[in-house]
Image (spheres, rainbow, N blue to C red):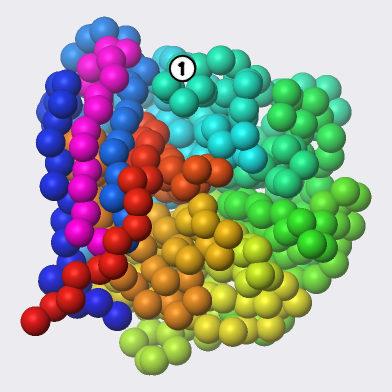
Amino acid sequence: MADEAALDRPSISNRQSAISNSQYLSTAWISTSVSFARPFSATSSIRTTTPTTTFNQSFTYDHLNRLSTATDSGPWSQTYDYDIWGNRGVRAGSYMPASRQTPTSNTSSDHGLPQLFNQSNNRVIATAEYGYDQAGNLVKSWGGPGKGYDWPSAEHGISADYKGNLWLTGSGPSGGGPGATQDNMILKFSRDGKFLLQVGGRNQPGGNKDTKNFERATDIDVYKKTNEAFISDGYGNRRVIVLDADTGAFKRMWGAFGRPPDDDPPAPARPAAAPGGAAPAAAAAPPSTPEGSPRFANPVHGIKVSNDGMVYVCDRTNRRIQVFGVDGKYVNQVFINRSEAVSAAGLAFSGDPQQTYLYVADYGNSHVVVVNRKTLEVLYQFGKRSPTPGDFQGIHNLATDSKGNLYTAEVAPGNRAQRFVLKGISAPPTTP
């Protein structure tokens, strides 16, 4: 593993304008040049979606540098509280208009265009000709409650399968407002919003060994060779569960190290914080033994299946990624900034046929970490906690498109998506 103290940071030159820590810009493009002396070289662009006005932001962090609260003040006020796992709650009495975007997840289709899942306004910013074009212009969106399915009370994950369908997860009531219902289901839609499948139901928690319901599932990836949906489950449960991608029929499930899921009850959902509530207590550090915790912690937050049939799972609170075969057999693991805040939140593969690199969203430390997918060597990382384009505040998930470009989604306080354009591959520099 690379020496973190010696890792390169991106050199950012702003070509148009800047976002300060105390101001949002109206629908203006912010373009930066980000260069690295490592295999990933990129440019990034973001577009803000707030009205033309000024908002002051303030943040508080606990003694482990984890975000505790984020407050926006201006024409409207919004305060978020965060628990020790990074789950967000909206304080009662605060107000946020639906136009305020909060992307919780992103993905891309074989058309190479991004789609976002917005928690603040119950919408899917869909894929290909129905989503954002490469210039970042919104073409179409859809979503919200409808006939025949239970829309999540707190939207969380979105992923596109090899047929172009979209799979959605919800984390409610974690991350939802007061009175949010419990999301024990997953949903499947066509890319233009036609409902196709629901597995599980609202307010039907069944625990870690339930084969019909979920406990605030976080992410889904469909493996083409077996036509199976691999699901990280989740904020309440602590497992990987696999379904038939057409029928939703249960296939298999497992916990950390490929063992059977544990029998403990689901982790409780985080309620909305009361006004003026105290910051949550600090989380205990994961075990320092070489193998780490013998089981997944909450949340099991991300999952991706590579072309060669390896399953990569984000065990966020345990600061690691575990690797399995598609049959659930344990293969290996890698720790991501183990001695720091909670880390591995989302995954994406590089766009080359071999999927040489694994990109990891380090939520607690505001980095994108680049890993050699086969050897699990951490090569480098970029970004820091900052509102500056190219940095991150609450990086929650990421995705790549068919051209190898990287898209990141930030929850509060970042509340934005960024695009990094692949410029080429170079060998990491040698250290003397």
**Residue that lies at the very extreme toward the top in this rendered image:** 52
Q: Which contiguous range is marked in magenta?
A: 23-38
Can you identify the residue that label 1 sits on?
Answer: 137
Secondary structure state at the residue bearing disc 1: loop
Q: Amino acid at mark 1?
A: Asn
Q: Is residue 150 above or below residue 363?
A: above
Q: Where residue 281 appears, x then y in whole percent? A: 30, 61
Residue 58 is at least partly visible in this image: no
- 88 lies left or right of 432: right
Number of other residues with Cα within 10 Å of mark 1, as a class: few under 14, some 14 to 19, many 20 or more: few
- 265 lies left or right of 62: right
Which residue is depicted at the point 56% across and 65% down?
354
Q: Is residue 311 above or below residue 301?
A: below
Q: Where residue 201 appears, x then y in whole percent? A: 78, 44
Residue 388: quadrant of the picture: top left
Which residue is depicted at the point 72% across and 54% down?
222
Which residue is depicted at the point 48% across and 39% down?
104
